[in-house]
Image (cartoon, coloured by chain):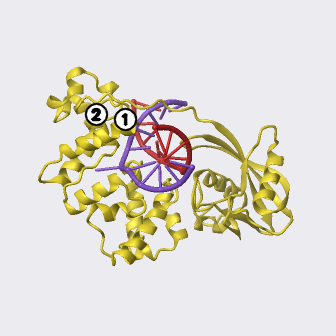
Chain colours: A yellow, B red, C purple
Amino acid sequence: MQQTQVTTVESYFHRFIRQYPNVQSLAEADLHHLMKVWEGLGYYSRARHLHAAAQEIVSRFHGVFPDNLDDLLSLPGIGRYTAGAILSIAFEKPAPILDGNAVRVLTRVFHITDNIDKAFTQNILWKLAEQILPEKNVRSFNQAVMELGALICKPGKPDCSICPISSICRANELHLQAMIPLRSPRKPVPHYDVTAGIIWRADRFLITLRPPKGLLGGLWEFPGGKVKPGETLETCLKREILEELNLRIHIKSHLVSVGHAYTHFKITLHVFECQCQAGRIRMNPDAATDFQWITASLLDQYAFPGADRKVIVAIQRKHLIRGGPE
DNA sequence: AAACCGGGGCG
DNA sequence: CGCCCAGGTTT
């Protein structure tokens, strides 16, 4: 659930646990199938890390989940927070946790006005979380702090009138709830124009697999790329397809343009229907690590980014033979 | 220390 | 539209 609200994860969690009910089944999981289960949730390295961690638990720890800090921290995707959550919630061991909710509660209760994005402040908060840890009921305590932050000590308007610990809260005493916690100012998010091609060959078109690391790692997409200054959309698409796949294409028509927002930038994705003209696919591994020629009816079997999902709706509206009731 | 990594909910 | 979310990894 890292950096993702609980309500967003709930339905994914149930499907995930049904698909992979134990650490052995996750360790043996097909990675593409796992990415399909994760599709739409974001931060796709989490899925890859869970998969790798399950494999290490099977191989290094004989299938038994570790219950000590060092072993937990040695697993991919498990940092200080997740290790503390596992120790305290799963094993009732005395470990502090510090998520976004706990940060808000602690900075307000103890009137900490330092910038919480600084490592220095984070260290102070971790020490504080350690100090306030009770000797018993750590599981309930840690969850209670997070729940207090999620339901009452909210970012915008905290409901201090119904807060069970308002009497010991320094921020409430000083009426400074709205000023705390202090964060670094955000940087402006740039906008990019991006092109993508639906490259047809007979009744099939081309999809490519993004490299495992980096943005949208391990997801399939319609090949293309970022428009350079002074470049037309068509020139960009032909250049990208040549650079990434060594293919020459013929651009037939504009299919759709969709907007999409990421955390650090925004894009407009311009999609064109194309014909494969010449060349034999030779992938640039920085852009694609696999490819498939598929029919429109197979699209739902692959995991795609949100922006490409919007494009797929346009493809299915235009090309897919719709069955079912009239 | 700072940048990177998604998508959704909410005011 | 801007902010934030049961953070971790890479640079």
Q: At numbered mark 2, what does the secondary structure look like: helix, strand or loop?
A: helix
Residue A232 position in % (x across, y down): 82, 42
In the rendered image, the vertical position of residue A136 relative to residue A72, given as above or below: above
Residue drawn at 25 percent across, 59 percent down: A87
The quadrant in which the N terminus of chain A is found is: bottom left
* Residue A137 makes an appearance in the image: yes
Quadrant location of the C terminus of chain A?
A: bottom right
Q: Do the residues labelled 1 and 2 touch (CB within 8 Å)?
A: yes
- Residue plotted at (19% across, 30% down): A169
- Left or right of A311 on screen, residue A119: left
The answer to which of A101 and A132 lies nearer the viewer is A132
Decide: few, some or many residues near mark 1? Use Cα within 10 Å; few <14, some 14-19, many ≥20.
many
Same chain shared by disc 1 and disc 2: yes
Asked whether the viewer can see residue A294, the reply is no
Residue corresponding to mark 1: A116
Task: Answer above or below: position of A310 versus A18.
Answer: above
x 37%, y 55%: residue: A79
Report the residue at 54% width, 32% height from top: A187
Gap in angstroms between the C-alphas marked 1 and 2: 9 Å
| Residue A287 higher or lower than A113, as above or below | below
Return the chain for callout 1: A
At label 1, the amino acid type is Ile
Comparing A280 with A119, the one in front is A119
In the image: residue A161, left or right of residue A79 = left
> Mark 1 vs mark 2: which is more N-terminal?
2
Q: Picture coordinates of residue A158 (x, y %)?
A: 29, 31
Snapshot quadrant of residue A260: top right
Residue identified by numbered label 2: A107
The image position of residue A155, as x and y in percent, is: 35, 33
Q: What element carries label 1?
A: loop
From this view, report whether residue A326 is shown above or below residue A142. Answer: below
